[in-house]
Every structure is written in C-alpha cells, then in structure tokens.
Amino acid sequence: MKTFKKSLLVAACGSLLAAPSAFADGFQLSEKLSVTGFVDMSFVYTDPDAGTSTSTAGLDQFEIDFLYTFDDKLTAQVDLEYDDDPGDPDGEAQEVDIEQAFFKWAYSDELSIVAGRFLSYSGWETQEPTGLFQYSGTGYAKYFYGAYQQGVSAKYSNGTIDLGLTVANDLGNLTGTGTDNRQVATEFMFAITPVEGWTTKAFYMAEGETTLINAWTAYSTGGLTLAAEINSSENAGAAVAIGGVDAEASGYLVMANYAWEKFGLTLRYHESEVETSGGTTVEDLSAITLSPSYTVSDNLLLVFEYRTDDDNLGDTTTDSFAVEALLTF
C-alpha cells in the first residue's frame, strides 16, 4: 500500500511539472482540474534546562491537492501528503498518505453536503502550516480538536450563522483504539459572524465515552488579528497519554497578530492541564510564543519563532528557536 501511495505522489508531481502555467493560487491543469500545495521546511533548536540541547533541520511536509469541478454544484478534492514527524503515534516518522479524499455537493447557496475522508471543522489552529500565524501549534490539539474523519457532513450558512453536523466512523482515532473499537462519532458546529471581521465558533464532539468541547472567537481589522480559544474534553487524547485511564483535560489560548507591508508579528500564550478521574493532575503545561515573519514573495514566507515551554509539574523549562520556509503554489 505504501508503494502505491508513493507512486501516486510521483505521478502527481509529474502532472504538476507538465502544467503549462502556474499562478500564486495553484496550477490550472485543465478547465475543470486544478492543483495547489505547499513545501514546508524548517530548522529547530531546542534547549531544555534539564537535558541536552538538540537541533533538527529538513523537509517537514510536502502536500499536493487536486481539485476537480464537475459542475456548479458538485466538486471533489484529493490531498496527497508527505510528512516527517518523529512523534507520529503510528511509529512511522516518514509517510506518504492520502490525507483527504471527499466530494462536496451544493444543494443550494446555503446548504452543502461533504462525504468521504475530511478534516474536522473544529479548532482555532489549523492542521496545516499554511493556516498558522506562527511556526508551531500549541500541541494540545490531540485533546480538544477533531482530526481526519471518514463520514458525511452537512453545513448550513446564511452569511451570519453557520450550522454544521458531521456523522463519522470516529473523531480521528483520538481514543487510541485503532480500528477495532471505534464507535460512531458526531460533531456539532454553531458559528456566528455578527459584524464584519468578527467570528465566533463552538463545537461539541462525541464518540462513546469521549467528548470534546472547543470554542473560539477571532476579530480582524486592518492588519490586526486577535483570537481566543477555550477547550475541555473527557477521555480523548489525554486518556491515551496516561495509559487509558479516564481523564479530563482543559486548555485555552490567546493570540495577537499584526501584519504590515511584508512583515508580521505574532504573540501567543496557551495552557493545558490533564487530570485523572480521581482528581490527580498528571500534566500541566504552558507556553509563550513570539513569532515574526517576512513575506519574500507571493509564494514564499519565512517564519521565525522563539518559544518557551513550562512543565509546571516537573518544574522544567524548554526554550526553542525555529526558522521555517513555507513555499506555496
């Protein structure tokens, strides 16, 4: 299967190189087929006060997305991804995967249906680096965000209020049960945009005894973006992290970003805590992130990051420095 996936990626690259023209927002292979994607590279230096400093450099991720338009109501998308993640829970640091594969049917201007394999709508911070305001994610998404799911999702939007309902085979394996004990999962979304530039979204997700609540609000005006998020969960990734014991987790973030000309600056603070059902705190983390960025061109972004993480249970601090080059097409 992995050989087959790699063959798909090679074929995709061949099609991309053969494209007659390229634009900042993708390559138009035909009247109905277009391709977008990105290349994500980084250098990271980590300096814990209770251990040995380490550094890594290389290609983090490469993704190519195929978008096909059948007509004005039916579209399809397939995302192919190469990912290098030493912390991958499956134990495979370097993988080539079909990340998403779904079709979208627009029943009307307000109501649409998505079916296949797709990413949960939940969470302020995106799964992909192209949607982040800084280099690193908080790291607590495994506790509070839904992941890649296989199922059906319906979304209603009238420009002010969005309602969403997803029924899937799981929340993205957040319970760590593999394929044997997964249960039908549901995700509810309510979103409101009361004025231009201000959006608030709330999500409730459930799979058996696992529940997740995520809510965030963001306001953008001119070059300024402000955001805040609050989360809670029961028996999600937190339970896996402590050996399957029933657990509760909570967390939040606040973030500010200001962009001017070709420059950007992000300041973020976040906290997360995990407790057993007996009330014992087994994880208590917080971090401050400062991340300037520079837009080299329409397709190339450089991101710099300083981050300090505190493990409040172990009373340890880790400083990290990162430089990221993000090329989009």
Image: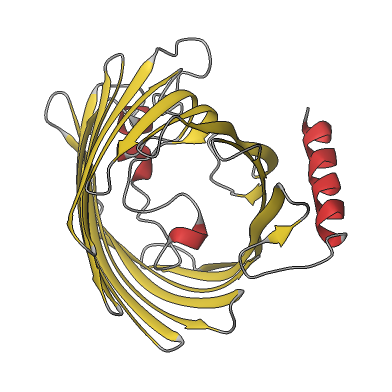
Along the viewing direction, whichever of 175 and 72 lies nearer the viewer? 72
Vertical order, 120 against 320 (above or below): above
**Relative image position of residue 73 (x, y in whole percent):** 54, 36
Which residue is pictured at 59% across the width and 82% down the height?
297
Along the viewing direction, whichever of 184 and 211 lies nearer the viewer? 184
State how the image is colored. secondary structure
Quarter where residue 208 is shown = top left
**Relative image position of residue 260 (x, y in whole percent):** 37, 87
Which residue is pictured at 49% across the width and 83% down the height?
294
Left or right: 37 as drawn, with respect to 178: right
Left or right: 15 as drawn, with respect to 299: right
Vertical order, 58 against 160 (above or below): below
Which residue is pictured at 55% across the width and 76% down the height?
301
Can you say which quadrant of the picture contains the N terminus?
top right
Along the viewing direction, whichever of 101 and 256 lies nearer the viewer? 101
**Relative image position of residue 222 (x, y in whole percent):** 28, 79
Vertical order, 9 against 49 (above or below): above
**Relative image position of residue 164 (x, y in whole percent):** 31, 32
